[in-house]
Amino acid sequence: MAGTSKATYVDSEFMQFAPLIVLLPMLAFPIILFLGRVFNRNPFWKDKMKEGGIIALIVMAASLLVSLLLIKDHLGGFLIDHDTIDFLWLNTHTYSTGGLAEHTLGFGLYVDHITVMLLFVASFLCLLINIFSIGYMNTDPINDNRNHRFYAEFVLFCSGMLGMVLADSFLWLFIFWEIMGLCSYLLIGFYYEKPSAAYAAKKAFLTTRVGDVFLMIGLVMMWDLFGSLDYAVVFDEANIKAVAAESAGTLQWALGMMFIGAVGKSAQFPLHVWLPDAMEGPTPVSALIHAATMVNAGLYLVARMFPFFGSEYLQDDLVDLAFIIALIGGLTAVMAAAIAFVQHDLKKVLAYSTMSQLAYIFTGLGCAMYLANTLDWKTDDADHYIVVIAFGAALFHLFNHAMAKGMLFMASGSVIHEVHHAHHHLHHHDHHDDDHHDDDHHGDEHHGHDDHHHDEFDAQSMENMGGLASKMPLTATAMLVGSASIMGLPFIGGFWSKEGIIANAWRVALDDPRFFLPAMCVLIGAGMTGFYMSRMWLKTFAGKPKTEVAAHVGPTNTWIKIPLFILTFVSLSAILFAGMGFTHWAPDSEYGLMSKKSLIEGIVYEINHAFANSNTFFFILTYIAITFGAIVGPGLALSLYGGDLAEGETVKPWMKPIIRLNAWAFDRFNFDNKSVAESSLSKALENRLYFDHYYDMAMLKLVAGFSDKSAETDKNVVDGVIKKIESGTQSISKVVRSMTTGSARDYILMVSVGALAIFFLMWGVA
């Protein structure tokens, strides 16, 4: 039975179709699995249906279409409220002192400004990654006859993310959260026959479960405080007032427990160890986890806490939690960026970049929460504006990072895909009489190990690339634009949001000195990001090919090119999004998305705010951040890596200045950094600061030890008790059987004894 709650400010005719966004991919899951099992190896299924890829594509396109229709009705329509629809499955009644109380069980949809942002990101990127997957997964023989499993798990993953975004309660958020966790385990371990992939899947599953335990504790505490987990109840100002009067400290602890869950899902220190190893999954999985869905779930959970921080009844009560959120973000940003400095694996550079950029967003959210919790933002116009742009900058960076990182992972997949195929072609050119086609090993997920040739070629290592800008122009362009967005280069993608996060972090630091550390971390992190992202691009696309394989790399297929082309323009169009109010993303009609400002007015405002800020401190801070991220970091990378292309090789006009500048800097300033590379710090960074070593020790000594003791207890105690009960029961049965003689006299005697026993028992009680 369906029932719709009142929509106070938004009248959406598409709200009733919103469940299809979640249901369509969920229903596609069993369909793809079934058809894959039935029609596996069928030519039509393989060539035309792409082993389920086309079904997944249709389903995700439909989910995106419904999402866009829903979003259209809500753009510019938010004031302070939301739109909901409930689907009730069951009505129950429980008896209490006051009589019968009605309880409902069902699933509801909750659409507000945060939902709209994440809904577009998830549905849009899931579709593009689906397109990329068809070009990536269906062109490698190793995946033949098992792609249906990949696409089935893919659509279920997407359903979990979309359901989490649209859910109307923390309970349903948690349920879909766990669906994503299960699917991530299956997808990361897609090549389960490879020990490292199986290990990575288990590592991701167990590490995120640590966070999930704390999330459950927080939800139980929240239920105890509010008697419900529905957003409509817990975000109600009257209910917050009642809880704040008696249990403000307990609420902060509950939110803190939930934040630990977000730390696990978004791979923040100290629960970050699973994310780099998740690269063992196929590259589409990496793009899915890092860009569209899973890692953003933690950020979404924290953003959902905003009504508590912004409540006038909890003012100044949640400051410590806001600081912890910002601090974890700041520390993770610097740590992950430092480890990315020395990585040679293309995908792992991007993995640590993801950790670092998510940390930026956590810092931005922490600072926004602090401002909302300390300023009189609901009545004072100046304070209101500060809170709106602080929260908006964090969410806008989530948007920019998702688009850029999705593009970067798909671009890296394009490179790895073609490097692997070039390696395969070169080897088999000399062994054309051999029918072996890497059925057991894959250059991407299997690190290029080919048992037939007994070599150690790694198709993901940047040490085996170089000079690819001329051979893969679209991929090189996409990775250049994506890298520029992550670095925060002016006018491109992440600049508009990263500048806002840095500025607001320092705004808060001026008010509360504790925030000086996260503020300094995000500022230094800007320069570090500029270095390792430039290093990645130069080692991959500039200079001369480092191997014969790199010299024979060919262009990518059309399926892979389509999402790269689209996302390149999305990142380059960031100024348009900024002008539309994406930097002011909040439940506010004055400053929010599609506000009263025209597009031109919005663009002019953003440019003036960024480059000609009237506040001297923030004006200087902006240019310090630009210098670090756009000059110092990239300049150092230019002098260390790459160089000019091989003779006769040319690149597209927009990349020529970068190649020429790199060649000049490389020749002019290149120095021997062998001592730095061999230093103890460098070794420690290469070993991920030994966190994985400690993780393995913890798993071996704690988890494995606990499992052994549990097994021993189960065997000796539980099984022992059951066996004793069993043996005792058998003994009693033997005695009873011996008494069943068949004689009426014996039966009369037993009945008489039983009756007397009951009589004396009742008499004694009376």
Image: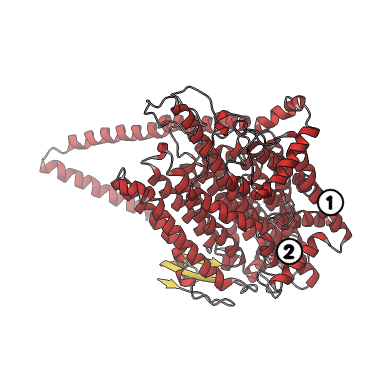
Which one is nearer the viewer's eye here, 167 or 766? 167
Residue 246: x %, y % from top left? 68, 63
The quarter of the picture where the C terminus appears is: bottom left
User: Which amino acid, mark 1?
Assistant: Pro
Q: Residues within 10 Å of mark 2 (few under 14, many from 20)?
A: many
The quarter of the picture where the N terminus appears is: bottom left
Which one is nearer the viewer's eye here, 383 or 48? 48
Depth check, mark 2 against mark 1: the one in front is 2
Which one is nearer the viewer's eye here, 750 or 156? 156
User: Which amino acid, mark 2?
Assistant: Ile
Q: Residue at x 66, y 52 (%)?
A: 256
Q: Looking at the image, which residue sits at the far left?
A: 743
739 on left or right of 225: left
Residue 389 marker: 2
Q: Secondary structure at mark 1?
A: helix
Is residue 758 among the parts visible in the rendering? yes
516 on left or right of 391: right
Q: Residue at x 85, y 55 (%)?
A: 510
Residue 3: x %, y % from top left? 45, 73
Q: Is residue 561 above or below residue 553?
A: below
CA gap, disc 2 and disc 1:
21 Å
Q: Which residue is mark 1?
A: 513
Which one is nearer the viewer's eye here, 314 or 188? 188
Residue 291: x %, y % from top left? 58, 50
Q: Residues within 10 Å of mark 1 (few under 14, many from 20)?
A: few
Q: Image quarter for residue 685? A: top right
